Image (cartoon, grey):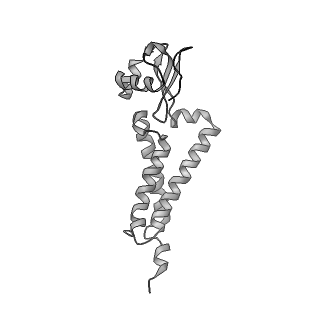
Amino acid sequence: MPDWTILFTTETPVLELLLRGTVLFFALLVLMRFVGQRESGGLGMSDLLVIVLVGSALGDALTGGGTNLLDGLVPVATVLVWSVILDALTYRWPRLAVLLKRKPRPLVIDGRLDRRTMRREFITEDELLTQLRAHGLSEVSQVQRAHLEPNGEISVIPKDGEGDGTS
């Protein structure tokens, strides 16, 4: 008969698991802050961190590679709790969001390319033109503003009477 208590005990001290989850979450948060916005795709930075860390922490517990469930669940719970706490803190204190959350970056301002931002985010003119066409615009001169959003997508505000502004 299997010993079911092994599933709910932990080989690693719970405090160590909490510390590991906390350190990994914040280390990856800092590293992701320096990665371009496009790299995160359609996810927010903290969403991407949670997915990566949860997948990693649960990997062994899910496949039985670890001997118990708590060694996987404690770090996952830690990561999820920190994610909720950071969202609550940035909601409560918007100035903190400046450090932890990305802001939209301008790619086009009054029909002119912002090449500095494009260079920093590794966006070519052809890639930007592709996005403009998806919004019903054929030329940069038709764009009032275009931004690289925190989720990695490009939003476009056409000049009055230009294009449909949808994607």
Compare residues 36 and 137 and report the one nearer the observer: 137
Q: Position of residue 49 (x, y in %)?
A: 45, 47
Q: Position of residue 152 (x, y in %)?
A: 45, 34
Instruction: Give above or below for 164 relative to 59.
Output: above
Compare residues 28 and 41 and report the one nearer the observer: 41
Quadrant hosting residue 120: top left
Quadrant into which the N terminus falls: bottom left
Most extreme residue toward the right is 92
Q: Position of residue 24 (x, y in %)?
A: 43, 51
Most extreme residue toward the bottom is 1
Q: Which residue is rendered at x = 43% and y = 56% of the image?
A: 55
Q: Is residue 85 left or right of residue 156?
A: right
Q: Is residue 159 left or right of residue 116?
A: right
Q: Which residue is rendered at x = 40% and y = 56% of the image?
A: 56
Q: Which residue is rendered at x = 53% and y = 23% of the image?
A: 165
Compare residues 131 and 145 and report the one nearer the observer: 131
Instruction: Give above or below for 69 relative to 81.
Output: below
Instruction: Give above or below for 107 relative to 99.
Output: above
Instruction: Give above or below for 153 relative to 158.
Output: below
Tag count: 0
Q: Which residue is rendered at x = 45% and y = 66% of the image?
A: 71
Q: Position of residue 145 (x, y in %)?
A: 51, 19
